[in-house]
Image (cartoon, rainbow, N blue to C red):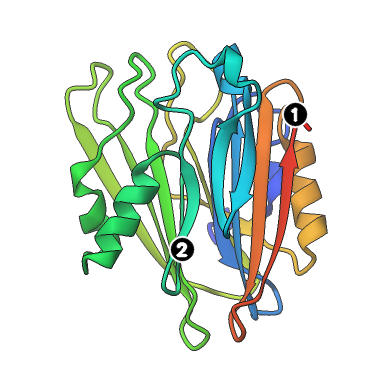
Amino acid sequence: MDIYQSHPIQALIEGNSYVGRGIVLGLTPSGDRAVAAYFIMGRSANSRNRVFTVKDGEVFTEPYDASKVVDPSLIIYAAIRQWENRLIVTNGNQTDTIYDGLAAGKHFAEALESRCFEPDGPNFTPRISGVFSLDANAPRYEMSILKSIDAEGSDCARFTFAYPAKAGLGHFIHTYVCDGNPIPTFQGEPERIATEDDIDVFTNALWQALDADNKISLYVRYTDLSTGAKNERLVNKHE
């Protein structure tokens, strides 16, 4: 068993009908661009009624049909923001919590101390988050998952993972292991993936691997570490 093997992103998703929401952070094989991706899936009509939009460099989830929104509290939020040279990616409104925490001088994990998993029992969907420090000399990223410690949602277990960015390597964390009732939450460390230099190759591989019925939206950003220039792709099932 090669514990250091990096898998193509599609190999970790194909055939799995519901991995939920997912975050990828990493570095291109050329070593000059930061990779960040976020996708959402949904089973209910309320969850599926969404699109990604980009406003002033920030990514938001928004209703596709505002007249059909039932409960916006857990499905409408800023998914990607940037504070100075740190790119924030999350699956909920903890994006703003992290942004405010960094601005106040807090560390990533410290900023999340006021948050826990989502109040959607019996699933208790984990809050997954990532921050990429876009430092050309020492790029690095952190990932976090806040999840219920038991089936009753009695308390929050907190896990933070810190990585030096390495060329060709990325890490993938998602909310669920697979579909179920209740839906089993992600287990273990973020999964190792092989990145791509071509943003279109990576975007297409990820989008095509997601379950056709349950996928909703995908956003991918490559950031040049020396110039800060960004290249982005946005895919919405509802166009």
Report whether residue 71 is seen: yes
Instruction: In the rendered view, tell whether residue 237 sits above or below residue 87.
Output: above
Viewed as shown, does residue 33 lie left or right of 144? right
Q: Amino acid at mark 1?
A: His
Q: Amino acid at mark 2?
A: Gln
The residue identified by callout 2 is: 82
Mark 1 is surrounded, within 10 Å at the Cα level, by few (under 14), some (14 to 19) or many (20 or more) other residues, namely few
Tell me residue 171's x, y (percent): 54, 56
First in sequence: mark 1 vs mark 2:
2
Residue at the spot 17% in from the left edge and 29% down from the top edge:
155
Say which of 68 and 41 sits in front: 68
* Quarter assignment of residue 150: top left
- Element type at marker 2? strand
Tell me residue 232's x, y (percent): 70, 60
The residue identified by callout 1 is: 238
Mark 2 is surrounded, within 10 Å at the Cα level, by few (under 14), some (14 to 19) or many (20 or more) other residues, namely some
